[in-house]
Image (cartoon, helix red, strand yellow):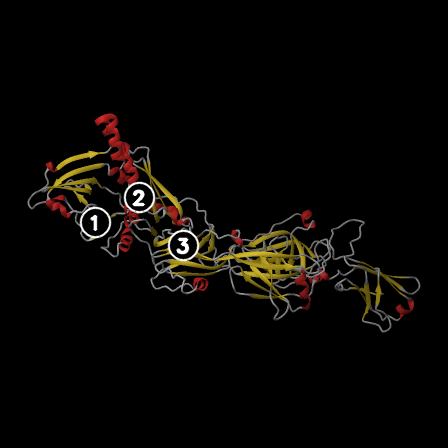
Amino acid sequence: MATLVLTVVGGIVGGPVGAAIGAAVGQQIDAEIFKPKGREGPRLADLKVQASTYGQQIPQLFGTMRVAGSVIWATDLIERRSKRGGGKGRPSTTEYSYAVSLAVALSSRLIRGIGRIWADGNLLRGSSGTFQERCTFRWHDGSEDQAVDPLIASALGIASASAFRGCAYAVFEELELGAFGNRIPSLTFEVEADAGGVDAGQVGHCLLEKTARCDGEWPFAGYAASGDRMRDALAPLFEADGVRLLSGPGGWRMAPTGLTGAPLTLADFREAGRAEAPGDRTEQRRTPLSSLPGSIRLRHYEPERDYQLGQQTSQVAGGGVREERIDLPAVLPATSARALAQRLAAAAADGRETLVWRADLAALALTVGHVVALVDGSRWRLAARTVRGSAILLELRRHEPLPAAELPAEPGVPVSAPDWPDAVGSVRLFDLPNIGSSAASAPRLLIAGAGSNDGWRGADCWFVASAGAEPVPIGTVRPAAALGELTEPLAAGSDCLFDLSNSVVVQLVNSAMTLESVGDAALLSGANRAMVGGELLQFGVADVVEPGRWRLTRLLRGRAGTERDMTHSAGAPFVLLDDPALLIVPETLAGLAEGGAATLEWAPRGGTMLTEIGVPASGRALLPLAPVHGQSRADGAGGVTIDWVRRSRVDTGWRDHVDQPLGESSEAWRIALSPPVSGIGPWESASPTLHIGAADFAMLPPGCTIEIRQLGDFAVSPPLYLPLT
């Protein structure tokens, strides 16, 4: 239209010259307006970013590939609310968590299985098949008779739900989103479509509906075919491999570009009895070197870096400054990609030489794309063919490909999430003494957990007050810094001096865990506190015996009033206390454990197997400490006066000339004889002293012992035994 209009306008304004100019301009405008829509083949970025666009192409996968896929169905966010605390006049805490159910289309071709799964670049499921976040997972292989997924059918109704036949897809049911900022993460999947690698011949054989099979020269671990046309889907692969897509009377078919069997020569496609003549070479030309690219950059997927993008560059001999980039949506190791890039660079240099050869009608048996050999042994590829009467003009381009071989190349530094095998989890419960500057009003129960390797993500815990009671969630315990058990018995030692005669030999759950030595100043300031069974101790020196096994020496024993629990057998649990990953049972629930019927249930994150642990009923944090420094002295009148020094379960450090805080609402003592003597005692006192008169003292049997206990707000302290002489 623009050609016609501008031709007329130009003729009116400028005559014949103006009409010619108007026609030329109009043709350019019409060419831009009415040119056919461009076609696009597969792009590497299509497999990296998860999409949910309507009409998005779903590639056909071959071999093993990593693909993001397209979200084809999803629910709204599923909100869950949990309420904790609120007892004894304290405010409650309401926490919200979110989950989502969705289906992701992966391949429009049948698949064999799904391997690893990444979420936001981190492994959601490793090669072991264990999920790091709680969800229910299913996948459908893309067969033509696959059934409707039950979750989609229940959400949409069986009459409205699609089975997505011919499309392989994965379904997540209630995927927890807390680790992803309460949003749907970007998911990528390792999909196995074929048992082994593939080549161009296999891909074309499948896409072209089982036409003539042709072996390719270059093996690929995986390939993703997509595009507006079949030719677009195959073009990147054929540019890199030794096959071509050819057309003929029977339609499209595959054909090798290399020589198979005996070499094909032009003399074999001439009239009988006629050999090649120098006059048959009608034209030979070479394009300028400046028209060639200076380098070929091949981009591909690197299997050694979890299918991340990789690239290899090869220089074109004598080429210009232009760089040509080839995106190959295939999985190639770096060594093969480098060899392929060099082969493509050599092919670009060979392609600049063109030869026009005159043949006869017998040459019609040759198809465009075949490679032929001349008498001098040079190899040429048939690029075009022109028929002029009884003469055939063949346009040949030099074809001397490099052999398919792997060359040394570096894939680059892998930046990938560690793929840990399934870890064996261990969760222990410790009854702590009162540690801190405030008096506990409920038992202080500590939960510590760890796994046999760093892939263990923690455990979800529930508190069960009694048999048959409803489990109450108390949170998630994260991997502890150091958790294990004793491998050798530990004898009792002094609780007043450094214990230099005993050592703690502990086997940690994870061999990657470490312990550190500290100086005496740090040790006396509270460093390296650990629970061994029911004893709180500190260690100054930590020596590694073998991976995961440590020997701890220079000990401070029986800290915080745990001197009565200093004897341990092999297998006693050990945990390092200075660790924010440890989980404390809320006081409202810990108070229910005093009856001794409570249990703790835990399950590893992403798992369903529950393990039950009994909750101890001792409540060490509520026990007042036993008094010390007891002494008895005669009063000069035949009686005796008994004195002692109290201790406090509230730890505020050592201060000279300052008494420890009481730690109880009032001071009260109970004193009794052992064995009891009828008519004498027991006594109660509001101060750390007691007087026994001469008459009562004279009635005491020889070897009599007196027991002194402090009466606390919640419990009675262990006794101090003092012989009366």
Quarter of the image where one finds residue 435: bottom right
> In the image, 249: left or right of 325?
left
Amino acid type of disc 3?
Answer: Glu
Q: Earlier in the sequence, mark 3 or mark 2?
A: 2
Query: Mark 3 against mark 2, which lies toward the viewer?
Result: 2
Query: Mark 3 against mark 1, which lies toward the viewer?
Result: 1
Q: How many marks?
A: 3
Residue behind mark 3: 190
Quarter of the image where one finds residue 291: top left
User: Can residue 567 be seen in this snapshot?
Assistant: no
Q: In the rendered structure, are the residues bearing label 3 and label 2 in contact, judged by CB atoms less than 8 Å apart? A: no
Residue behind mark 1: 247
State the residue in front, 479 or 53.
53
Q: Is residue 466 above or below residue 123?
A: below
Q: Tell me the distance, in whole angstroms, between the alpha carbons under discs 1 and 2.
A: 23 Å
Q: Tell me the distance, in whole angstroms, between the alpha carbons under discs 3 and 1.
A: 35 Å
Q: In the rendered structure, are the residues bearing label 1 and label 2 in contact, judged by CB atoms less than 8 Å apart? A: no
Residue drawn at (23%, 41%), measured in percent from left and top? Answer: 400
Mark 3, secondary structure of its residue: strand
Mark 3, Cα crowd under 10 Å, few <14 / some 14-19 / many 20+, is many
As drawn, the residue found furthest toward the left would be: 273
Q: Earlier in the sequence, mark 1 or mark 2?
A: 2
Q: Which mark is residue 37?
A: 2
User: Can residue 717 be seen in this snapshot?
Assistant: yes
> In the image, 372: left or right of 324?
left
Amino acid type of disc 1?
Answer: Ser
Amino acid type of disc 2?
Answer: Lys
Residue drawn at (72%, 60%), measured in percent from left and top? Answer: 441
